[in-house]
Image: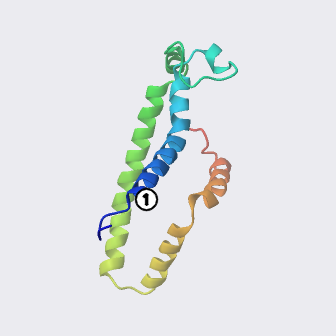
Amino acid sequence: MTAGLPNIGFVCSAFILLWIVLIAVLHPFLWLLFSTIKPETELVQYPPKFFPQELTFENYIQVWESIPLLALVKNTVIFSLGVAAASILFDSMAAYAFARIRFRGSRWMFTAILITMMIPFQVIMIPLFVEVYKLGLLDTF
């Protein structure tokens, strides 16, 4: 074996392992996708089949008619763009102040901001929900 060339057995086993992992990761997503185009009788049949025997888009039509999906997407886009714009505006001003201006307590405030950024959202999610609920802001849009 020459130096610099990988062992062919190692490369083949690595590719086989990667294909197995790829199939294991993609299988649930493909199952979900194929389940959306199956009629209800195929969804509940036993044993389940991976590929649909009969294609139907009734599920998509039913969801589109029962949920105001376009309005929800519009609201989400407006809200997320507003939050992003406000975040860019205020965060860039704070970053400029911390980078260029030395004031009393700036190191302490910068450390406090960094510490709060390290707290995962899952930790504060329920207390934030309770706070929004108590303020009466839940489902007010």
- Residue 53 in percent (x, y) is at 54, 14
Q: Secondary structure at mark 1?
A: helix
Determine crowd level at label 1: few under 14, some 14-19, many 20+ residues with C-alpha closer than 10 A. few
- Residue 79 in percent (x, y) is at 43, 43
Report which residue position mark 1 lands on.
10
Q: Quadrant of residue 139?
A: top right
Question: What amino acid does circle 1 point to?
Answer: Phe
Name the residue nearer the viewer: 95 or 42: 42
Image vertical order of residue 48 relative to residue 9, above or below? above
The color scheme shown is: rainbow
Quadrant of the drawing holding the N terminus: bottom left
Name the residue nearer the viewer: 60 or 129: 60
Instruction: Write the residue at 48% across / 32% down.
Output: 72
Residue 41 in view (yes/no): yes
Q: Quadrant of residue 71?
A: top left
- Residue 104 in percent (x, y) is at 43, 87
Instruction: Write the residue at 57% across / 38% down.
Output: 140
Instruction: Write the residue at 46% across / 48% down.
Output: 16
